[in-house]
Each structure stands twice: as C-alpha cells, then as structure tokens.
Image (tube, rainbow, N blue to C red):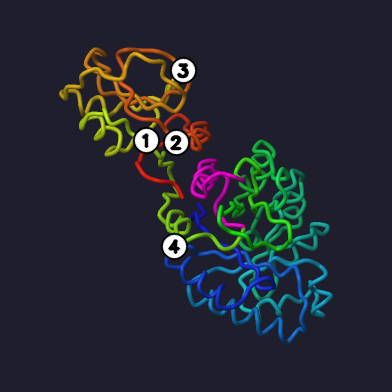
Amino acid sequence: MNPRRIGISLYPDHSDFAANQDYLQRAAKAGFSRIFMSMLEVSEGKDQVTHKYQALIGEAKQLGFEVILDVAPNIFEALGISYDDLSYFALLGADGIRLDQGFDGKKEAMLTYNPQHLAIELNMSNDVAYLDNILSYQANVPFLYGCHNFYPQEGTGLPYDFFASATSRFKRQGVRTAAFITSQSGTLGPWSVNDGLPTLEAHRHLPLVVQAKHLFATGLIDDVIIGNAYASQEELTALGQLDRYQTHFQLTMLPSASAVEREIVLANQHFRRGDITDRMIRSTEVRKQYADRANPAHDNTGEFQRGDVVVGNDDFGKYKNELQVVLTPHRDPRKNKVGAIAPAELMLLDFIKPWTKFQFEEGHEA
C-alpha cells in the first residue's frame, strides 16, 4: 500500500524566496511531505534559473519534502537540455519530473530507467489507455507516478465520474496517484486566471479539509496536494491533523443530546453494518456496549433528513442506543435526533460502504 501524503505547490517564477521559505517551514511543521513545483516558465538565463531552483529545492529537501518539478517541452528548449538526459533536474535536487505532455509510451517507459532514479509523473486527467501503453513497454513501475491536472478557470474542473474512471486506470496498476485541492485563501498559481486550483470542479468552493476528506474517501488518491499558494495557517494545521485513512464527519450536536448520546457518537469507533440498507447507515455495536444505559425520548417527532445522526431511545427495545446516519428522509419516534453532519460533507456519505470505518467530531472545518 502507498502511504497517503499531503502536499503543497510552489511557483518560483511568480513569488519570492523568503515567502516560499516561510511556507515550506510552516507546511513541514504541519506534516506535509510533498511539493509540486512549477517550472513551466523560464524567463531568466540558465545560471539564474539553476541557482533559484537549487536554493528553493535545497530548503525543501532539508525539511524532508519530496519535490516533483512540473516541466513542459519549451523548458527543455529554453535551458538547452534533452529528455534523453535528465541529469539537470537531479542537479537541481528534484526527486522527479511531471510530464505536462505525453509521448508514444515507449519514450515514457525508457524515461523511468533514467540513471538519476528520478520519478516520472504522468498526467492522469485523460480517461484513455495511456498508462497501459507505457506499461506494455515494460516501464519501471516504482519510478512511475500519476497526477491529475488542476483547473484555474471556474467551471472547467473534472466531473467526479470521469475523475474516478481515469484514476482507476492508475490505481489498478499500483501506480502512486495524486490530485489537487484548492485553498480558499490562496491567490497564486501558474497563470493570471486563478479561480482556485482544484482537480474536481465540485471542490472549487468547499472548505479545504472537506476536499481532502473526499479525495481520501474515494480510495483512489494517495497524495492530496494544495494547488494554489499560499494556504492559510488554519488550513495547513487542519489538513495536517486530518486522518487520511478513515472519514471523520464534522458534526453539529444538538444541545438536547444527553451525555450518553454524546459518548455513543463521539467516543466510539463506528463501522457500517455489512448487510446494508438504503434508509440509513447503521452502527450496531454501540447498542450492545450501552444496552443498560437509559435513553429517554427527545427530538423524535420530526422527519429526519439526510445526514442527521440519530440514536435509538428507550422505546426501541433491543435497538436502544444503536447509532444511525440517515440516508433517506423518514420518521420514527423510537429514534432521537442528536446531531447533523455538516452540509458540505454530505457527499462523503456515498463512500461509507459495507464495513467502512468512520468517526465523528465536533469542530470547525478549515
């Protein structure tokens, strides 16, 4: 299994060294370990470019980051280097390069055998047999990565179904995958248009942590990277604290929820019962643990809505103190409403499959 990582993006041609250095230090402290570094524009001479990137990558490497440089054919021409010799990027200190433009498959496969052992990252945002072609030429898979594009223009990001289909081609082959989320405070990207830099259009205006929760919940993405710079300290801290391996729903608890209900919801590891139903997600183990705890009825007469969290009350017999997350609206006075999942996180309910583990927490999403 590929350990899941979080990352940031840097744009050295549109920013200054001191600001990037500060961002690196804050991100490293928050638990980030990967960098997408844009090298799509070179407006200075080769010596200046070399010095600038060596200095910044050197800072990143000292802090434990893996650095992937985003490159395009015009960069090779401007710097007088060749795809047949990637030693220049190793000289800069990079761990790999992202190919903004593809070749014939044979070329990409050969690149994965570069003597500098640089990772070769492919564009994943095309649902075609590109990867299969490369693998048919016996590519060196441990040095092959996949990474989606980001989309600076409002309305141009990928729809989820297309994203899932394209990503699955890489995931099935065991290739490390990455996608971008967008900071709601970042204003810096590679181009003058910057309506945020997400991979998925549905993420563009969501809180940063919700975007990351969604990508990790799909089970398709190993590395989640903030596409724009600079994310706020609140966003960095919140993303650094995120559980990358199971969904923690943000929950607003009702003031009327009892102490036992709060304990059932917030202090337990939940998982969805294996024989599922469309009406709700059932976490049934807690009812056994709290079978002898009283739970008087309250907030039980209205229609429960999708994302409501309910707990069986004293009138529910053997199902007393069972926790359920409502999927389709219904009424049942034997259940108490104790809280509601944040509206932005309702999309995550689609990924709670049979036996999926999940937890709840109160608090503010960055």
- What's the residue type where badge 2 is placed? Ala
- CA neighbours of label 2 inside 10 A, class few (<14), some (14 to 19), many (20+): some
Furthest residue toward bottom? 47
- The verdict on residue 3 being magenta is no
Residue drawn at the location 70% of the way across and 79% of the way down:
87
Which is more N-terminal, label 3 or label 1? 1
Instruction: Say which mark, if any, is on residue 31.
Output: 4
- Compare residues 258 and 199 and report the one nearer the observer: 258
**Which tag, 2 or 3, sits closer to the chain's start?**
3
Q: Earlier in the sequence, mark 2 or mark 4?
A: 4
Residue 281 location, x and y as percent? 42, 25
Which numbered disc covers residue 342? 2
Q: In the image, is residue 320 above or below residue 224?
A: above
Q: Which residues are magenta?
A: 204-227
- Tell me the mark number nearer the camera, choosing from 1 and 4: 1
Q: Are marks 2 and 1 in contact (CB under 8 Å)?
A: yes
Q: Which residue is mark 1?
A: 252
> Tag 1, which secondary structure?
strand
Q: Secondary structure at mark 4?
A: loop
On the image, the x and y values in percent for residue 264 come to 26, 32
Amino acid bearing label 1: Thr
Which mark lies nearer to you, 1 or 3? 1
Residue 133 in the image: x percent, y percent? 77, 51
Q: Quadrant of residue 270?
A: top left
Mark 3 element type: loop
